[in-house]
Image (tube, helix red, strand yellow):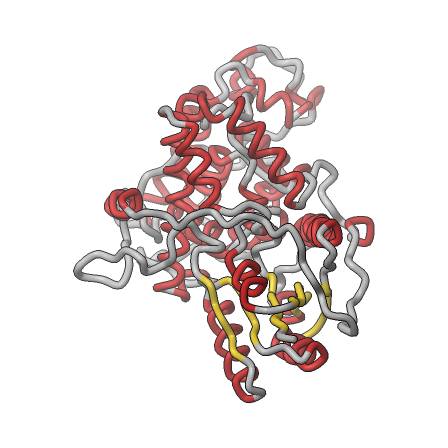
Amino acid sequence: MTISVVLFTSDLRLHDHPPLRAALDGSDAVVPLFVRDEAVAEAGFTVPNRMAFLADCLADLDARLRERGGRLVVRSGDVVAEVAKTVAEADADEVHMAAGVSAFAHRREERLRAALEAEGCRLHVHETVITALAPGAVTPASSDHFAVFTPYHRQWARQPLRDVVAAPRAVRVPEGVGSEEVPSRSGVSGVSPGLATGGETEARKRVTAWLRGGIGAYEDRHDDLPGDATSRLSPHLHFGTLSPVELVHRAAAAGGPGAEAFVRQLAWRDFHHQVLAARPDASAADYRSQHDRWRSAAEARDDIEAWREGRTGYPVVDAAMRQLRHEGWMHNRGRLLTASFLAKTLYVDWRVGARHFLDLLVDGDVANNQLNWQWMAGTGTDSRPNRVLNPVIQAGKYDPDGTYVRRWVPELAGLAGRAVHEPWKLRGLDRAAFDYPDPIVDLSEGLARFKKARGRD
């Protein structure tokens, strides 16, 4: 009997899963394996929100496999050692897995290949499982990757995507391969109270509802802060409970300007992955240095803490930061505003903000989080690196009636209309009555400091 191991990583689904399909087609039985990698924990990525969502995903994956006669095998430890042990226990001939894009993923694949080949076992790494288009599938004539989104998107949109692979009807798992207990969300402490539910079942319900009722208005409403009119599918894309290939196909089939705008955002996700694949050090170093001399941690300590706690005195910034803490998720327009405020108005190193986001975001991954932060800090791929978003102007545009602010900053719930965005301007108001701070920085002073630091004054 021939046996293959399928190593699940950021692809926790059964629908449109090329590694699983290849293993089932080429073997009599498969071992669906997930390793709780100790190296991920050591790197600081096993934060409560993602661990709780991951537990949901693994429990759902196990349940879906059991419906098909299989089960999920869960191990903990060094991923190479645990895969090798599983291969030995199952007497497997092959291991299948999805290709990653980070330096960590590439090192993992190299170590796995070397260890498995030494034991006579082949490793098959499959592209277009985590992204719709593989990094490096399209490149400009003069470089190994696109550094600007628009020409990348132009080429990306012309590429045919592979067909969607159907979920298996049956999965046969060999006897004698041991497993730990599948983790449960209840075993994770410190989880944001409003954290969404994970798992492929939830993901497919959400995407069906989105395609039926939300995507049509996406082009006009994706920046609508109080309307919350985005798909909220980013956590499922991060954990791979949804296939980006399938999502592009289904969105394109829906048609219309909203679908086109949504698919464009999926292309942005691929864009960031191809940048990181080509420049792995962009996870921690400036992609395009502006020679910043950021304020020191000691100098900016109080400002950083106020930003983290949602007590900056700028209501829309504080609302977004409180949404992050409560849900482990933040509206994309809020991400832009809060990042601009920290990196440019407060002139604090983007890495401070990126780390805080990774500590809380359920969808926090290196490619999208770090490169979006760099985009807003002006050290990334933005063609206008010195743009600064004014939080008051932005709030008036994207939260015109103050509904989003009042939702997340209850101290200001009694203020009417746009007045909620500038409470410090109200006359005859007992400021102590609503316990809301004055602004920690004057916007004009923050802008002047930033321009001087960048040599733009």
Q: Is residue 211 left or right of residue 443?
A: right
Residue visible at 68% across and 23% down? 411
Above or below for 258 versus 89: above
Q: Is residue 58 above or below residue 114?
A: above
Q: Is residue 353 visible?
A: no
Name the one closer to the observer, 387 or 187. 187
Q: Quadrant of the N terminus?
A: bottom right
**With 203 as the anchor, is 347 left or right in this view?**
left
Q: Is residue 5 left or right of residue 153?
A: right
Q: Residue at x 55, y 14 (%)?
A: 426
- In the picture as drawn, the residue positioned furthest to the bottom comes out as 118
Residue 456 x %, y %: 25, 45
Residue 135 pos. (x, y %): 36, 58
Q: Taking 275 as reference, is 386 above or below it?
A: above
4 or 109, which is in the foreground?
A: 4
Which of the 4 image quadrants contains residue 281? Answer: bottom left
Where residue 376 sits: x, y (%)? 40, 44
- The image quarter containing residue 179 is bottom right
**What residue is rendered at 17% in x and 61% in y?**
142
Q: Position of residue 151 (x, y in %)?
A: 24, 46
Q: Is residue 433 left or right of residue 158?
A: right
Q: Nearer the viewer, residue 274 or 208?
A: 208
Instruction: Check the picture and name the quadrant holding the C terminus.
Output: top left
Task: State the count of labels.
Answer: 0
